[in-house]
Image (cartoon, helix red, strand yellow):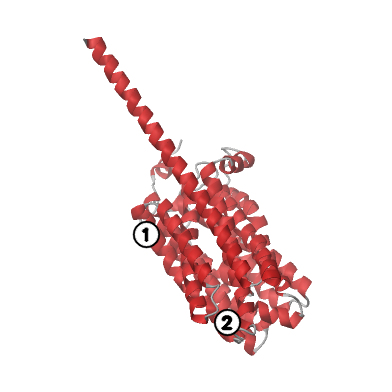
Amino acid sequence: MTATTDVTLEWEGHPRGSREYKRLVAALLFAGIATFAQLYSVQGILPLIASGLEITPSQSSLAVGLATVGVAVSVLPWSVVADRIGRVKAMSISIVVATVLGLVVPLSSSLPVLLSIRFFEGAALGGLPAIAIAYLSEEVHRNHTALAAATYVSGTTLGGLLGRIVAGPVAEVTNWRIGTLTVSILAAVAATLFLILAPAPRRFRAGDSAGPSLGTRLWANLKEPGMLVLYAQAFLLMGGFVAIYNFLGFRLEGSGFGLPQSLISLIFLAYLSGTVSSRVAGQLAVRHGRAGVLAGSTLLMIAGVGLTISSNLIVILVGLVILTVGFFAAHAIASGWTGQRATVGRAQATSLYNLFYYGGSSVVGWLGGVVYQQFGWTAMALFVMGLAVLALIAAASHHASTKSHHALTNRTAIQKKTAITTNRSTTLT
């Protein structure tokens, strides 16, 4: 083993406050902005797309859904690419290709063309969420990974907010094409900042073929109950969250409220609360542990969804903020925990998290529209609350069983130690 490898193994990661830590966190912040601004730029203008193309709300939501399907199916391949060529290089390719495709989206001549480009744009974008958490888990000191992951998540919230609040007003004044083009240009600026700031990895060695096979790495994470619980959080909570944001605009433009698109797009300012809550959740997790923060965040999300059932606009908006606070706090904890918990195939572990995350966005995001069209908003809200309750039960059950297992293990160890001590005393006597 070389001296360089020895130093690499002894190095524990960038500590919080160091220059490289700040660069890494800033780079991932901008990468999150670039990725999610493009991914969700059309969500704020779905009513305009629906009316312009004379399609139903659930059909228009495919402009979001196909992109998230692209992300979901690409995260695992991207994790393999990252294992071969390196984290930063793979993320750089991902973000550059996605930015180019984002600039092509406004040229779409029909819905099928739009959906095709959005799918491939999502597939390109999948490289960032597939790799980002693995990258920071390897390069940041373990004591600060929860906070660093929360900062990355806050960048994703800023990106999602930017894409929505910019595209909406611009599209209303011009058209949806100009709206998405404006967002793509802003995303290109953020992507450039990522390329400039991202530090070269120190712990990872690209092209190392040693270690378990891909199938072994995937199975090691899929068979671990704790990882499955985290993947369930991703699928259930993200799916419900996207369903609410996909179709609240349709409700607010309806006869009960009659709001214009420029005002409806402002509901995405609630994302700012998620930017704050994701970092706060990371800080709380360092002090009080992840499990309690995850449970509390999910309860907040459930309460927020419940408030959106109201017919009072102020109450709905308050509920949306509470929902967003809860969701992004839960996501920050679950995503960071995935990278930290994985002992084999960290890149595959975080990619599986994103597979379930965007799978939930695609499947539940679309299914929520079907429920909304058939039964109305209250039914859809109850549907989303039910999903969050399932996520809460899964997490609480696993945490309780884990605590019982640890208590039993500790008790057994104490009993064995006591028995050994007693035997020694008897022997001496």
Q: Which of 138 and 216 is in front in this view?
A: 216
Q: Is tag 2's residue or tag 1's residue first in the polypeptide sequence?
A: 2
- The answer to whether residue 262 is left or right of residue 280 is right
Name which residue lies at 48% across and 56% down. 200
Q: Where is residue 248 in the image (x, y as percent from the top left)?
A: 60, 75
Residue behind mark 2: 264
In the image, residue 240 sits, relative to residue 54, either above or below, namely: above
Q: Position of residue 413 (x, y in %)?
A: 36, 28
Amino acid at circle 2: Ile
Identified at 58% across, 64% down, the residue is 382
Depth order, front residue of 196/305: 305
Q: Position of residue 261 (x, y in %)?
A: 61, 84
Say whether residue 319 is visible. yes
Location of residue 60 by image quarter: bottom right
Q: In which quarter of the image is residue 25?
A: bottom left
Question: What residue is drawn where x is 59% and y is 43%?
Answer: 222
Q: SS for tag 1?
A: helix
Please tell me whether residue 412 is drawn above or below residue 79 in the rendered image.
Answer: above
Quadrant housing residue 257: bottom right
**Quadrant position of the C terminus in the picture:** top left
Instruction: From the top left corner, tell me how far across and down residue 285 is, in percent.
Output: 39, 55
Q: In this view, does 157 lie to the left or right of 377?
A: left
Callout 2 environment at 10 Å: few (<14), some (14 to 19), or many (20+)?
many
User: Up-down: is 194 above or below 235?
Assistant: below
User: Mark 2 or mark 1: which is in front?
Assistant: 2
Q: Relative to the observer, which residue lies in front, 144 or 24?
A: 144
Count of numbered tags: 2
In the picture of the structure, the residue carrying the numbered disc 1 is 283
Residue 202 higher or lower than 429, as above or below: below
